[in-house]
Amino acid sequence: MPYLIATCLAPVLGIFIDRFGFRVHIMVAGSLFMIAGHLIQLFIPDCTDQCSISLITPICLGISYATYCVALWGSIPFLVEGRASGTAFGICTALQNAATVYAPPLLGYI
């Protein structure tokens, strides 16, 4: 569900950022949505029947993923020179994939 929300929301956020800016504000909002989603997951009670409140967490995470992919990846060309943009995208992709590989075992160990 978070990826579906991010898929639908990313083009809308991209148009908004291209038209109005506010890239930094959207990144902060994405961080707040991620924190809120995890805190809600932490504090909601366990339930067995029709737990619609548990949908809030994937919605918050979907909004967070959309803001990161639009605001963060779109800011790379503004931060590096044009001739180094391929390297910058490659390094960002490598770091993202490394976090995807190493974070779950580390969290499982903790």
Image: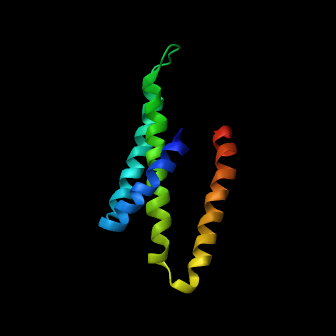
Q: Residue shown at 49%/37% (left/top)?
A: 58
Residue 105 figure quarter: top right
Q: Position of residue 84 (x, y in %)?
A: 57, 82
Percent position of residue 109, x then y: 68, 39
Please tell me which residue is depicted at 38% across the width and 47% down the height of the picture.
Answer: 32
Q: Which of 41 and 77 is in front in this view?
A: 77
Residue 40's place in the image compared with 10, above or below, is above
**On-image quarter of the N terminus:** top right
Viewport quadrant of the C terminus: top right
In x, y percent, where is residue 8? 47, 48
The residue sitting at the left extreme is 20
- Position of residue 110 in the picture relative to residue 65 (left or right): right
- The answer, for residue 44, to whether it is visible in the render is no
Query: Toward which corner of the image does residue 52 lie, by quadrant?
Result: top left
Nearest the eye: 42 or 87 = 87
Examine the rendered structure and indicate whether residue 29 appears above or below residue 56: below
Q: In this view, does 52 lie above or below 98?
A: above
The residue lying at 43 percent from left, 40 percent from top is: 60
Tell me what residue is drawn at x 45 percent, y 38 percent.
59
